[in-house]
Image: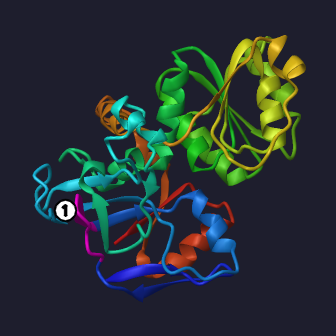
Amino acid sequence: MRRLKFLGNRRVEVVEADVPRPSPGEVLVRIRASALCGSEMEAFRSDREQAGNPGHEMVGEVADACGNESLTEGQRVAIHAVTSCGYCYWCQRGYELYCENLRGISNGHSEYVAAPARHCLPLPDDIDWDTGLMVGGDTQGVSYHAATRVGVKANDTAVAMGAGPVGLGHVLLLSFWGLRVAVVDMVPYRLKLAEKLGAEITINASEADVLAELRKMDDGRGLDFAFDCVGRPETLQVSMRAVRPRGTVVIIGERGETPIYPSRDIIHSELAIYGSWYFLRRDFYEMIGLVRRGLRSADMITHHYPLEQAQEAYDLMDAAQCGKIVFQI
């Protein structure tokens, strides 16, 4: 089968590899489309060669159900790539993201992937591959999980720090729900795309005073929510200062340690700070419902490539001149 391989130093190529052999409880999936995730860029930029690729957003058809009665051959599925065991303390209580046997699926930029049957989510016939890939992968799933954790509602105000794929997912979802949304980034291409997806205000952090621009949106009182999709010290500091007293900051981006001074940053403004990571399998079905009510998740996709043009795709992502990129396999 064809599979993408990371060679190190920003180089990728398509290689031939053996079709994976599913373990007990797994099925074999013929991948039809996969999406490039920003989290893959660290491996892309590394000088180290990898055996395969870190792709983990994928949709396809069950090629071999391997005796699993919950799925049938030919069935369309989205693969939930953070897998849980289903029987540990946390799984039994519905908190599968804390599973004691948590693992991930990689090598998604391949013709075939072996995946646990319980993490192959049936994709309804009325949901196309692109949409299934967005709601079954990080882009819309992460934003949905974060937003539903904190109870956003129509007419609330919010800022997304960062207009990468996850930040764009927040813009699209929150504006769909009727929130007034601002987005902060330093890349004009991404800010323009965020505006197209529903952002009321776009702020280039390299050119403007971010807090001053945000104050124009909230009459100086502060926003209801800030979603930090970057996770750098400077973005978290801006997020905490952007929200009103008793406002909410949600941290999604993971970019190192950040100093927080509880008295100044949290206590006296009674600020609520949440961490949010990935999304649950049940979130997928709730997002399908939103798509049927008009959420256009596939609008975040700006480029499609065959696997053989992966080098061009990663170079484009590296230059931050794209939204979501999809490989058609």
Whether 73 is drawn above or below 222: the answer is below
Per the image, the residue denoted by label 1 is: 62
Q: What residue type is labelled 1?
A: Val
Give the quarter of the image for residue 49: bottom right
The residue positioned farthest toward the front in the image shown: 89
Taking depth in this image into account, of 116 and 309 the one nearest to the observer is: 116
Please give the name of the residue rendered at 42% of the width and 77% of the height, measured from the top-left corner: 307
User: Where does residue 20 sit, x and y in percent of width and height?
Assistant: 30, 76
Mark 1, other Cα within 10 Å: few <14 / some 14–19 / many ≥20? many
Q: Can residue 197 be seen in this view?
A: no
| Span highlighted in magenta in the image | 20-30
Does the segment drawn in magenta span residue 3? Answer: no
Report the quarter where the N terminus lies.
bottom left
What residue lies at 63% left-to-right and 39% top-to-bottom? Answer: 252
Residue 188 appears in the picture as rendered: yes
Is 140 placed left or right of 276 in the picture?
left
At 48% from the left and 25% from the top, the residue drawn is 148
Q: Which of 2 and 275 is in front in this view?
A: 275
- Name the image quarter holding residue 329: bottom left
How far across and how far down the image is residue 214, in percent? Answer: 78, 25
**Circle count:** 1
Residue 41 lies, in percent from the top left, at: 63, 65
Element type where label 1 sits in the image: strand
Residue plotted at (48% across, 33% down): 145
Relative to 209, 2 lies left or right: left
Q: Which of 256 and 328 is in front in this view?
A: 256
Q: Which colour scheme is used?
A: rainbow
Q: Position of residue 86 (x, y in %)?
A: 32, 42
**Relative side of 157 to 327, left or right:** right
